[in-house]
Amino acid sequence: MQGMDGDNIGNVLGALAEWVTAQVRSAVALEGLNPAEVSALLLLSKYPDRSIELLRAPLDLSHSGCVRLVDRLVQGGYVERREGEDARKVALHLTLQGREFARTAREQRAEALARLLHGLDAEERERLGRLASKLLEQSVPQASTAMKVCRLCDYDACVECPFDGLGP
């Protein structure tokens, strides 16, 4: 791929982004949950006992849309509502089923990404990681957007997160 110009690099990067997105979505589409529901469970596994507001921006949902999503997760046995830090707030808590789902989804995502990186040697993976981090740092303007981009991330695996301090 010698001599690639900016347009070609952009096209290759765009195609790769689409492929990676499809592979990750396929990997975490467990038990028939939709991508927003999976994202919500993964976010709640990282930030337990938070209010519905934690989910709104990263999932790009209205308040009422988020309430309906949480209702589905409660009905499915993944989430329970508990008393929040004050009487006006409700804390969202993952049930054992919700925690297991989140763990399995993270594992499936990691396996899909490992398959994608399999053809690169250690030096190439390191270089790709540095370049991808640089692009993320330059491209993602604020923490709320970073939460959206990283909603499926395995936070424990991201030891050099480009969004250090990410989260509410």
Image: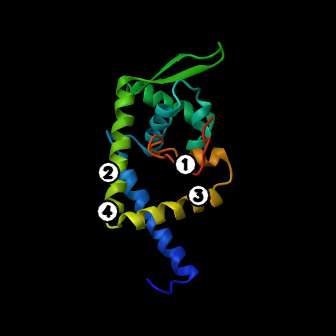
Residue type marked 4: His
**Residue identifier under label 1:** 161
Looking at the rendering, which quadrant does residue 29 occupy? top left
**Residue identifier under label 3:** 136
| In the image: residue 60, left or right of residue 100 | right
| In the image: residue 35, left or right of residue 163 | left
The answer to which of marks 1 and 2 sits earlier in the sequence is 2
Q: Nearer the viewer, mark 3 or mark 1?
A: 1
Residue type marked 3: Leu
Q: Secondary structure at mark 3?
A: helix
**Residue identifier under label 2:** 111
The answer to which of marks 3 and 1 sits earlier in the sequence is 3
Q: Residue at x 35, y 67 (%)?
A: 120
Marks 1/4: CA–CA distance = 21 Å
Q: Residue at x 33, y 42 (%)?
A: 30
Q: Secondary structure at mark 2?
A: helix
